[in-house]
């Protein structure tokens, strides 16, 4: 079985969107983009902003302590301002760290990438899918696939499951491809972004 190339799937979607804009003069599609932090968002926003009107959802109840959560959010806001994006907004959802711990109970000792991470990513992407569906977006997506530490196939499979559940199109991606991760590092240095040394939860911090 051939492994799916999510980058090529994204290319095709963007091509179709552009063709429709040219043919019918339609506005940009609306994208609800779940974002985990400023460094991961930098390249993704640079890449997608000309094709979509983007609203960022910062929903990451896995991040601890709460001061870390607040600082990552402030860095994301600063990035958007300093990169001078005109079609990007940001919204936040509740900091529900208790629910996160309930969802990963029993998987605390797993290495990164296992069932704990799957439950965590599902929680965050489900919030994005619900928000996108309720607020009339055309697509939802996540910056998480830019990380070499994240399983892009798993993230896309979760997104596609939620696409069916909430009747909202999921934008497939593997943003680390085509030097996306490398570009995110360059942009992080350019804007002097805080690059955290752990994913967010206390379990990833203990293993970092």
Image (cartoon, rainbow, N blue to C red):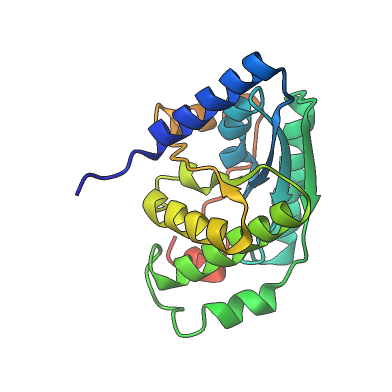
- Placement of 92 over or under 123, stated as above or below: above
Q: In this view, does 101 lie above or below 164?
A: below
Nearest the viewer among 20 and 52 is: 20
Which residue is located at x 52 percent, y 48 percent?
144
Q: Can residue 57 be seen in this view?
A: yes
Q: Can residue 199 be seen in this view?
A: no
Please tell me which residue is depicted at 43% across the width and 56% down the height of the picture: 157
In the rendered image, residue 121, in percent from the top left (x then y), is placed at 53, 62
Tell me where residue 27 appears, x and y as whole percent.
74, 25
Q: Residue furthest left?
A: 1
Question: Would residue 164 appear left or right of 166 to someone viewing this image?
Answer: left
Residue 192: x percent and y percent? 65, 31
Q: Which residue is drawn at 52% across and 52% down?
A: 197
Q: Which residue lies furthest to the front in this view?
A: 24
The residue positioned farthest toward the top in the image shown: 22
- Counting labels gives 0
Instruction: Give x and y (percent) for residue 160.
Output: 49, 55
- Residue 80: name its quadrant: top right
Residue depicted at 79% across the width and 30% down the height = 81
**In which quadrant will I find the C terminus?**
bottom left
| For residue 163, side relative to residue 61 (left or right) | left
Report the front residue among 185 and 57: 57
């Amino acid at each position: 079985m051939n492994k799916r190339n999510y980058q090529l799937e994204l290319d095709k979607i963007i091509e179709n969107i552009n063709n429709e804009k040219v043919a019918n003069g339609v506005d940009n599609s609306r994208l609800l983009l779940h974002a985990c932090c400023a460094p991961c968002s930098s390249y993704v926003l640079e890449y997608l902003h000309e094709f979509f009107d983007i609203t960022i959802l910062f929903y990451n109840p896995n991040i601890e302590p709460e001061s870390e959560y607040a600082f990552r959010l402030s860095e994301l806001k600063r990035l958007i301002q300093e990169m001078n994006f005109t079609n990007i907004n940001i919204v936040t959802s509740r900091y529900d760290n208790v629910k996160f711990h309930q969802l990963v109970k029993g998987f605390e000792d797993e290495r990164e990438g296992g069932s704990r991470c799957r439950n965590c990513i599902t929680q965050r992407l489900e919030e994005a899918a619900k928000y996108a569906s309720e607020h009339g977006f055309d697509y939802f997506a996540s910056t998480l696939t830019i990380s070499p530490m994240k399983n892009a196939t798993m993230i896309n499979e979760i997104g596609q499951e939620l696409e069916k559940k909430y009747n909202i199109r999921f934008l497939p991606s593997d943003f680390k491809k085509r030097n996306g991760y490398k570009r995110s590092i360059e942009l992080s240095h350019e804007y002097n972004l805080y690059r955290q040394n752990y994913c967010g939860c206390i379990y990833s911090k203990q293993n970092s």
